Image: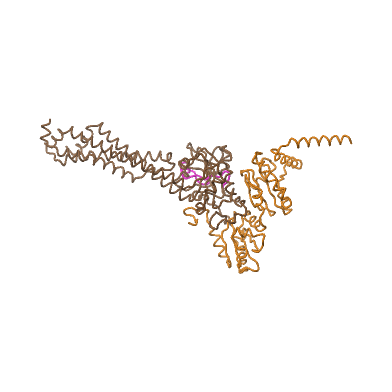
Chain colours: A brown, B orange
Amino acid sequence: MRLRTLVWRELFERKSQMLTCFLAILLGITTVVAIKNVTYYSEKAVAREMDSLGANVLVLPKSVTLQDYYSADMHDDVIPEEYVMRLTMSDIQGVDNLSPKLHVPVEVGGKTFALTGILPKSEFQAKAAWAGAGIFSRPIGCGAVDVGVEPEPEDKKTLVRKRVIKDLGSHEILIGSDVAAFQGIAEGDSLTLLGEPFSVVAVLPETGTVDDSRVFGHLHTVQRLSGKGDVVNCIEVVGCCKEIAAGLVDGVNKLLPDAKVVTVKQVVATQQNVNGMMERLSVIFLVIIVVVGGAGIANYMYANVFERRREIGTLMALGAESGLVLRIFLLKALLLGLVGGIGGYAIGTILAVTLGPKLAGVPVLPMPVLALWGVGISVGIALVASYFPARRAARLDPVATFQEV
Amino acid sequence: MSGRRLTLAVLTTIALGGLLMATPRRALAQTVARRTASTENKSLNESKGLAAIDAAARNGKYLFVYFWKANDKQSQAMYGVFQSAMKKWVESTDSIAINMGAPSEKPVVDKFGVSRAPMPLVLALAPNGAITKGFPIKFDENQLREGFVSPCTAKCLKCLQDRKLVLLCVQNEKTEFTQVAMTAAEDFKADARYAKATEIVALDPEDRAETAFLQDLKIDPRTSQAVTVVLAPPGQPVASFVGAVTKDQIVAKVQAGPCAGGQCGPGGCCPK
């Protein structure tokens, strides 16, 4: 009988116990892979967000938590749009740009995306001069200016980097890369949203953030179509770093006492806390796999060796060497670990890719490196846990086992 | 004769009764209603706001425009402050209250783009048409006074609100490099790229009326050298040159901008 046949038969000798051990490894690896995968892309999204938003300040409704905002960027609470003009006309120093947003769900080709109303700069920038002569005392080196005296066609794709665009028609839209890919939409196409036709003026480059699943339209059009009135969900304030340090947030807080004013750093800190928690959770699961999976496999192997002393003794009496017996049990453990690891990686990845965007609000892609990681851990645990029972089996004295029988 | 007397007596009684019944809470609504009624008699489609803007510009007066939506406590209180201040400045200032809901005033609401502005809102307009200050929601008389600015400030604000770049040349016959700085400014304006959207504004540093403006720009009124300041829309100082300056230096600063692209975060140009 060949080694492969021996191992295969040995594997299915105690099916229920084998299945329990296998499930322990599979579930453990699944959980760890899923958590690690989502955490990785969530951290990447945070880094990208931080890079694209810079030293931003967010003005949110009081009832909205930072986690609500970051996890989905969609909430039902609103603040009046007039806050935009209050900010624009104020003498607060360090406000570089403003970007009010209103999100409403919209169905495109049977799938729900977010229609985000944004206000182009042309609608409020000029009012910054209404702050009076005090604007001339603003420091040189901070603030968005309009020096493009020879108007050039605006590249609306810069919205994803600058957060603000100069102009946007009432029936013009910009679409995220995921929406464009899903619908096969290109620039210049027409799209009907909430019963009205819109012209696609730009397909935004992929950002890896929730912006990819969004359609951007004019704020006032979105307000009218959704019937929500003159309100927004949030106002992003692109501030100047020095002024943020010098109390821009306090200034905005005093100006808008009925709103919640936070810096992106606070949002990111909250998200980083969540990421940290998930990281710790994955470590806990890893420990559980090692303890439960390892103990289960060791127990299974010890029981197997004890119950099959006679067969092992017979095998050795027929000429099988200790090394062969050791190899049979270790190969059995290797197979269990290998299948558990691959299966765990596959299920964990599917879970991460499907549930990740819903739970963490970021697109998640498969990470092949986690396959090596998952298989390595499961095989390692299976081999370590099986080594001592296998060694015990290999050291059995055939004569003694026959005497016991 | 007796009939005319009777009519007069009835009208007087109605007017007195109306005055007695009037409460301070209704003052704003009644004032506006009277004005609106009067305007409607003239022409249903005429905007009294636009007419007031024209009149103030013709008479070389400031115009304070009070926009209101709801006749609530805040509006009434602020209208009281507004009226009290306007009575004091009646010689130099015109004023008008605009009901945002009045269809005839849509042109003026659209002109300033205040349909979604916080209310009540007061806009101060200089005789040249520049909006010198906006006062949303809550203000007092001292704050309203900030609506009056120096002639040079009003000129700069007007240019900036017309989306023009301003080259402010602070100089007089006593300052050094006066001619060099003015030549640089003129050369810049002569450049085809900037010609249409650039204005040169001259300012005498010894002009007492402009002291506050110079202080805002952090320029010493006793400066011994000409100072050239570049102001960009909506109202941002881009660069300041003391003494000699060339057109190329101004072009370089304008092209770089203070924070080109308006992004002060990572990858931006905010001073770290």
Q: Quadrant of the N terminus of chain A?
A: top left
- Quarter holding residue A34: top left
Q: Residue at 58% across / 58% down in the picture?
A: B237
State the residue in front, A167 or B67.
B67
Is A12 placed left or right of A255 in the picture? left
- Is A167 placed above or below A293 here? below
Quarter-of-image position of residue B41: top right
Q: Is residue A177 magenta?
A: yes
Q: Position of residue B90 (x, y in %)?
A: 73, 50
Residue B179 position (above or below residue A172): below
Where residue B29 appears, as percent x and y from the top left, is 70, 39
Whether residue B113 sits left or right of residue A299 in the image: it is right
Membership of A138 in magenta stretch: no
x, y percentage for residue A46? Answer: 43, 47
Question: Can residue A183 be seen at all in this image of the molecule?
Answer: no
- Which residue range is magenta in the image? A168-188
Q: Is residue B23 visible?
A: yes
